[in-house]
Image (cartoon, helix red, strand yellow):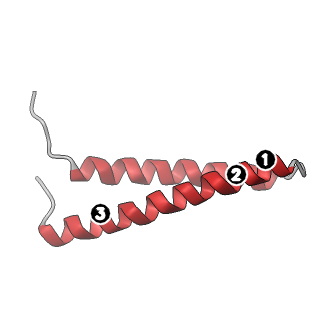
Amino acid sequence: MGLTAPEEVAARAKLAQLLQEHRDLDAAIEALALAGNGDQLALSRLKKRKLQLKDEITEINNSLLPDIIA
């Protein structure tokens, strides 16, 4: 069962937002790692959030792809 047109538009908008946040976290993680100030807790939190975003992105991508019956 696919998404309705409005649901697909909303899903694509959410996907774009999540992808941007994922890229922003990449940059923040890299900057924090390069700073070398040893804030491992902050680095760990950023990485955990990045993984959560990846899961959400995968879920939305799966909902946008049509089901393939093998």
Give the mark, 2 or 3, whose residue is nearer the N terminus: 3
Provide the secondary structure element on which disc 1 rests. helix
Provide the secondary structure element on which disc 3 rests. helix
Which residue is under mark 2?
29
Q: Confirm or deny contact between disc 2 and disc 1 (CB under 8 A).
A: yes
Residue shown at 21% from the left, 64% from the top? 8
> Observer-nearest residue: 53 or 26?
26
Which residue is under mark 3?
12
Residue shown at 65% from the left, 54% from the top? 27
- The percent position of residue 3, horizontal first and vertical second, equals 15, 60
Mark-to-mark CA distance, 2 and 1: 6 Å
Relative to residue 9, is residue 69 drawn left or right? Answer: left
Q: Residues within 10 Å of mark 3 (few under 14, many from 20)?
A: some
- The percent position of residue 67, horizontal first and vertical second, equals 14, 42
Give the mark, 3 or 1, whose residue is nearer the N terminus: 3
Q: Amino acid at mark 2?
A: Ile
Q: Residues within 10 Å of mark 2 (few under 14, many from 20)?
A: some
- The percent position of residue 24, horizontal first and vertical second, equals 59, 60
> Observer-nearest residue: 37 or 56?
37
Which disc is residue 33 wearing?
Answer: 1
Q: Quadrant of residue 46?
A: bottom right
